[in-house]
Amino acid sequence: MSHSLYSLLQRLETARIPFTLARYRPDSILVAITIVGERVEIDVFEDGHMEVSRFKGHEDVEGGAALVAEIISANTEPAA
């Protein structure tokens, strides 16, 4: 029996949907996919269960360099 992570990756590859893997939590691996108008984060856990978050929105251009600076400023962690 294949682990659900491998099954998921195979399904994404067969569908030719690009993905990235990341590890932000000690108990799961994050599979992130971006498709037109949507971003999906799939946390796959050791026991094989998945938790999915979907972020839907428009694809309008909302700004330029000033907006990038604003986003970075608003989300900068204070120095330790």
Image (tube, helix red, strand yellow):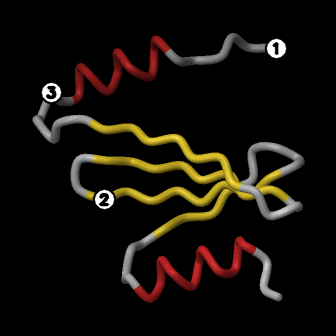
- Mark with earlier residue (2, 3): 2
Horizontal arrangement in the rendering, residue 35 relative to residue 6 (left or right): left
Q: Residue at x 57, y 85 (%)?
A: 10
Image quarter hosting the N terminus: bottom right
Image quarter hosting the C terminus: top right
Q: Residue at x 52, y 17 (%)?
A: 75
Residue under label 1: 80
Please, what is the three-letter code of the amino acid marked with disc 1?
Ala
- Measure the C-alpha gap from mark 1 to mark 2: 36 Å
Please, what is the three-letter code of the amino acid marked with disc 3?
Glu
Horizontal arrangement in the rendering, residue 6 relative to residue 20 (left or right): right
- Mark with earlier residue (1, 2): 2
Q: Residue at x 38, y 74 (%)?
A: 17
Q: Quadrant of residue 21?
A: bottom right
Q: Is residue 78 above or below residue 67?
A: above
Please, what is the three-letter code of the amino acid marked with disc 2?
Ile
Q: Residue at x 80, y 56 (%)?
A: 45
Q: Nearer the viewer, mark 2 or mark 3?
A: 2
Q: Position of residue 3 (x, y in %)?
A: 79, 77
| Mark 2: secondary structure | strand
Residue under label 3: 62
Category of crowding for the residue at label 1, using alpha-carbon neighbours closer than 10 angstroms: few (below 14), some (14–19), many (at least 20): few
Which residue is the extreme one toward the left? 60
Q: Position of residue 69 (x, y in %)?
A: 35, 21
Q: Position of residue 8 (x, y in %)?
A: 60, 74
Residue under label 2: 35
Q: Is residue 59 above or below residue 18?
A: above
Category of crowding for the residue at label 3, using alpha-carbon neighbours closer than 10 angstroms: few (below 14), some (14–19), many (at least 20): few
- Measure the C-alpha gap from mark 1 to mark 3: 32 Å
